[in-house]
Amino acid sequence: MSEDIILDIRNVTKRFPGVTALDNVSIQIRRGEIHGLCGENGAGKSTLMKILSGVYPHGDYEGTIIYDGKELNLGVGAIRQAREEGIAIVYQELTLVPNMTVGENVFLGKEPVERGAIDWNKLYADTRDILAKYRLEVSPQSVVKYLGVGKMQMVEIAKALSENAKILILDEPTSALTESEIDKLMEILENLRSHGVTCIYITHKLEEFFRITDSVTILRDGRTVATLPTRELTQEKLVSYMVGREMKERFPRSHRKPGEVIFEVNDLHAVDPNETNRKVLNGVTFNLRRGEILGIAGLMGSGRTELVTTIFGEYGKITRGSIKLEGEEIHVSDARDAMHKGISLVPEDRKGQGLVLMQSILKNISLANLDQFSGFMRIDGDAELAAATQQARALAVKAPNLQVRVDSLSGGNQQKVVIAKWLLTNPKILIMDDPTRGIDVGAKYEIYKLMNDLAERGVSIIMISSELEEVLGMSDRIMVMHEGRSTRTLEIAEATQERIMALATGIADELVAA
């Protein structure tokens, strides 16, 4: 093996009952490079990373892994052994202890000891050295729960590097970060590369591969499709490798023709119900037409999610303004009241708020609609199954049957289950908060087609998205928010990324060319 190859994965196969998750996968990763790993949900990325990080020890898979010149055989205590070998992983869901300091988290389980007691001075000095070496701008004494998500990400990286990691695996590291935090992470990765740390970078945000990686490996259906230098790829070529076909357009075309105004929000003000002196909405005005997709854009903290959860009756206490549905003023007390009025919400956090992960697909789809199937003291199981089956088929949920637990599904199929649940309520207004967050490009396209189909059938959709290309690609109009207020609603013909960002950051629209 060439000296510049730090990781040589040879013909690795991993089987589960009835499923081959990895099928003869081979990848070579060079020392000190940032190597992208991409593929649709279910392509095998997570399974491969679990093998490298010791979740699946040697013997649980077939094939050979050569690491730093010798075969990697992770046995009993494989996770700790992987860390000791210098292979560390930063997961999408952070694993920090909120009430501990940065230093305590970094050295948790491996605290320096002097005469039978933790040497706190050394712990914090060593933490400070790691943070300074890799330019991680956070204080060792800060309590983690008071940090923003971006700073928490830095602590996770410091924790991984505290054991002299040679390979750092980052799984969807920017999924919850702001643009400025993403910029900072990219600086950190550049610095890690300069120190010879090898990074494996996993993301659904294709543009990030072109921003930071040296080469990219594409997996599809558990097999290696290609490994290429990033400079030889385009987004279109990357997508075609991932899905196995050429996708000429990221956003499907629609023939919808929005009708009359069906929903109106006028000068809406609201406060945090638990902290009534804190405003969360400070004057939001917009309307929504029948069969329209209205995009809502804005930076994190602009009030987008607070707006839609307030409309849905589940967050802000309204202090001023009005909401009208089909010309009649409405007052929504809670989610059930919203549902009965014809408003449904696909939440931003599908796992925490949209699904009961340990329950079946069937139970998740029917959960918000049990009154449709209830009789005297019982649920009509046949009617419940028939309705859920119809929704699952309409949305092409990929699963052996509806009794499968929803936590076993890919992110895209989980999102379809959430949407199916709310479509079963027959909504007039469907609110979708970051509906394609954390799902692959093929599943995104299916969600987009579904949105178009719903709008063409007369359902009015409010869509929040953190991706400007998605807002521009799917919306008929775009309402932009800044600091809890609506700045302007743009017709799609006049909307550009520059104009949206100018409005989202509070810059006067007149200063930006149309």
Image (spheres, rainbow, N blue to C red):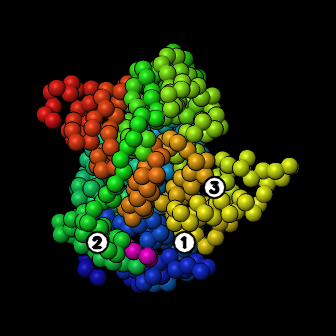
Residue found at x 45% / y 27%: 265
Nearer the camera: disc 1 or disc 3: 3
**Quarter of the C terminus within the rendering:** top left
Residue type at mark 1: give it.
Answer: Tyr
Q: Which residue is mark 1?
A: 56
Q: Of helix, strand and loop, which one carries label 1?
A: loop
Q: Are marks 2 and 1 in contact (CB under 8 Å)?
A: no
Q: Which residue is mark 2?
A: 246
The span from disc 2 to disc 1 (Cα, nearest Å) is 34 Å
Question: Nearest the camera: 39 or 457?
Answer: 457
Q: Quadrant of residue 294?
A: top left
**Secondary structure state at the residue bearing disc 3:** helix
Name the spot of residue 465 as percent of width and height, x first. Answer: 38, 44
Residue 158 vertical placement versus 223 (above, below): above
Calculate the distance from the C-alpha at mark 1 to the C-alpha at mark 3.
Answer: 32 Å
Q: Earlier in the sequence, mark 1 or mark 3?
A: 1
User: In this picture, which residue range is highlighted in magenta?
Assistant: 217-222
Name the residue at the right extreme: 377
At a point 48% along the width and 60% down the height, the residue shown is 412
Residue 63 within the magenta-colored segment of the rendering: no
Q: Is residue 326 left or right of residue 28?
A: right
Q: Residue 188 or 465: which is nearer the viewer?
A: 465
Q: Which mark is residue 365?
A: 3
Q: Is residue 316 visible?
A: no
